[in-house]
């Protein structure tokens, strides 16, 4: 089931938001501590990241708020071209990042896959 969702999302945009994951991020995201991060865990973590990075708390991330992001990736994620990312736009882009990082396609990210994705 996840595969189908991935295929649809992957067809619509490139990866975005080049914020690299540190090892501590992996441990934060792996909520059930099974040594793997599934998409649900990943998205829950990214929702927190979204609100953390939203410095002015307006529910949108601007280019300035996403310090260090690749401009091309930011614009690819900004589907409606309003110059900021809504939570939906942000999560759609990060879902693609998850898929790209999941090298063996098993639906989980291992620490090695997260490291390789940086
Ligand atoms: Ca887990
Ligand atoms: Ca904002
Ligand atoms: Ca937008």
Image (tube, rainbow, N blue to C red):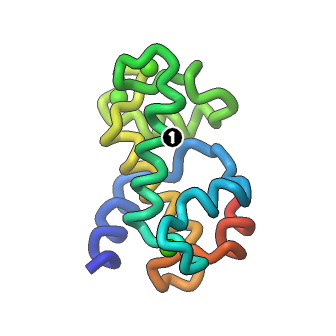
Of 60 and 41, the residue lying toward us: 41
Which residue is rendered at x = 30% and y = 30% of the image? 80
Question: Relative to residue 74, is residue 41 depicted above or below?
Answer: below
Label 1 sits on residue: 49
Question: Relative to residue 62, is residue 32 depicted above or below?
Answer: below
Query: Residue 57: percent from the left, percent from the top?
Result: 41, 19
Query: Residue 79: percent from the left, percent from the top?
Result: 34, 36
Total labels drawn: 1
Instruction: Say left or right for 53 vs 3.
Output: right
Of 47 and 15, the residue lying toward us: 47
The picture quadrant for ligand 2 comes to: top left
Of 104 and 35, the residue lying toward us: 35
Query: Residue 36: percent from the left, percent from the top?
Result: 56, 76
Q: Give the quarter of the image for residue 60.
A: top left
Label 1 packing within 10 angstroms: few (<14), some (14-19), many (20+)? few
Question: Relative to residue 83, is residue 2 depicted above or below?
Answer: below
């Amino acid at each position: 089931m996840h595969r189908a969702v991935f295929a649809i999302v992957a067809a619509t945009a490139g990866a975005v938001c080049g914020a690299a994951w540190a090892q501590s991020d992996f441990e934060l995201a792996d909520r059930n501590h099974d040594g793997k991060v599934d998409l649900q865990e990943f998205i829950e973590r990214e929702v927190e990241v979204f609100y953390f990075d939203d410095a002015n708390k307006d529910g949108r991330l601007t280019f300035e708020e996403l310090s260090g992001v690749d401009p091309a990736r930011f614009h690819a994620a900004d589907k409606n071209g309003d110059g900021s990312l809504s939570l939906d736009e942000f999560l759609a882009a990060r879902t693609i990042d998850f898929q790209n990082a999941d090298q063996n396609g098993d639906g989980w990210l291992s620490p090695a896959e997260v490291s390789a994705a940086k």
